[in-house]
Amino acid sequence: MLFNSAVFLFLFLPILLLLYYVIPKQGRNGLLFIASLFFYTWGEQELVVIMLLSTIIDFSAGILIEQGRKKLGLILSLTFNLGLLAVFKYLDFFFENYNSLLGLLGTDSSFLCNYSASN
């Protein structure tokens, strides 16, 4: 489901807005959380687990920061989120360059040489 799809604009969004204003204030964040999970699951089922893991880690980091362990919370959150960024943005770049280097050196490939993000 895309933001500009008919299903989102004429079904999902109106129902969500109606529910948001009908339920009590203390349940609104939970509703938005569940609706967000549903929305992302509709589009990318594989990535919902990573999104949930990121949410749990950042929530835990926020609790640590609130308890006064600011450095630990910040390090936890930054390490995990920058790690995700590195994996999803730069891992393919690393493997492509590794494969090119092995090709230039005339070396036989290892299992890393067969990696491709498009597979």
Image (cartoon, rainbow, N blue to C red):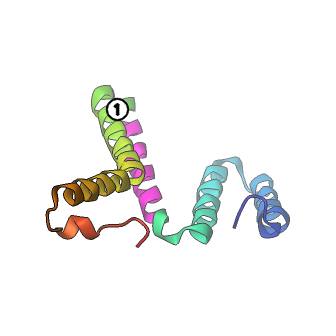
Label 1 secondary element: helix
Taking the spot 16% from the left edge, 56% from the top edge, the residue there is: 105
Residue at the spot 61% in from the left edge and 68% down from the top edge: 43
Give the side of residue 52 with respect to residue 114, left or right.
right
Q: Residue 16, percent across and down?
A: 75, 60
Residue at 29%, 27% in the rendered image: 71
6 relative position to 53: left or right: right
Instruction: Give the residues drawn in magenta, as a range.
Output: 49-63
Q: Which residue is mark 1?
A: 74
Eyeballing the image, is 75 above or below 41?
above
What is the residue that sits farthest to the left in this orientation?
107
Between 57 and 18, the residue placed more toward the observer is 57
Q: Residues within 10 Å of mark 1 (few under 14, many from 20)?
A: some
In front: 100, or 111? 100
Above or below for 17 versus 76: below
Q: Nearer the viewer, residue 78 or 102?
A: 102
Answer above or below: position of 102 versus 77.
Answer: below
Q: Which secondary structure dominates the residues rendered in magenta?
A: helix
Q: Which x, y percent locates residue 56?
A: 41, 52
Which image quarter: residue 36? bottom right
Q: Position of residue 22 (x, y in %)?
A: 79, 57
Placement of the N terminus among the 4 image quadrants: bottom right
List x then y, in percent, for residue 59. 43, 44
Q: Quadrant of the C terminus?
A: bottom left
Please name the amino acid that badge 1 sits on.
Answer: Leu
Q: State yes or no: residue 21 in magenta.
A: no
- Left or right position of 88 against 11: left
